[in-house]
Amino acid sequence: MSENLPTGKDRRIRQRFKINVPVTSLIGDREVPAYTRDLSNRGVFFYLYFTEDAQIDGDFEFMVDLPPEVTLSTTCRIQCRGRVVRIEESATNFTGIAAEILEYSILRDVVPIV
């Protein structure tokens, strides 16, 4: 039974995908670009330009375009409602945001730009 439990510091049960894909955070009436470090069906970690991080607090909405490597089909856009669970300052001009995904819906298939 213990072979299914995570080991070491990582106690996550859900599979995470370490992918760098664009995220659009909706902050008030603005769309703020960001990019993921990793994501799962229950959470996401993304980087946001540091001047925008103070405006994300609690629940917020964001969109992410999932590539075919994740969907095993076509690229699709997912709209999510999330809750900030952790903010990590970095030495660069970016801030890491860890968020729990509270709900999501598939908006549409995205046609890749050639």
Image: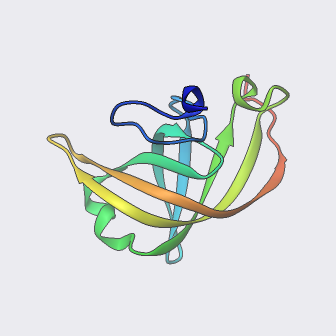
Residue at left offset 55%, top offset 41%: 22
Q: From what the image shows, is residue 61 above or below residue 92?
A: below
Residue at the front extreme of this rendering: 1
Which of the 4 quarters of the picture holds residue 109?
Answer: top right
Which quadrant would the N terminus be assigned to in this image?
top right
Q: Give the residue displayed 81% in from the left and 25% down from the top.
A: 72
User: Which residue is depicted at the point 38% across and 74% down?
Assistant: 57
Percent of width and height locating residue 101: 59, 59
Residue 19 as seen in the image, left or right of residue 104: left
At which x and y percent is residue 59? Answer: 51, 74
The C terminus lies in quadrant: top right
Q: Is residue 98 left or right of residue 49?
A: right
Q: Give the side of residue 22 with respect to residue 97, left or right.
A: right
Q: Nearer the viewer, residue 68 or 14?
A: 14
User: So how many labels did they put on this image?
Assistant: 0
Residue, far left? 91
On the rendered structure, is 17 left or right of 69? left
Q: Quadrant of residue 58?
A: bottom left
Residue 5 location (% of width, % of height):
53, 35
Residue 102 picture location, percent across and down: 62, 66
Colouring used for the render: rainbow
- Residue in view at x 60 percent, y 41 percent: 14
When the figure is inspected, residue 98 is found, relative to residue 111, above or below; the finding is below
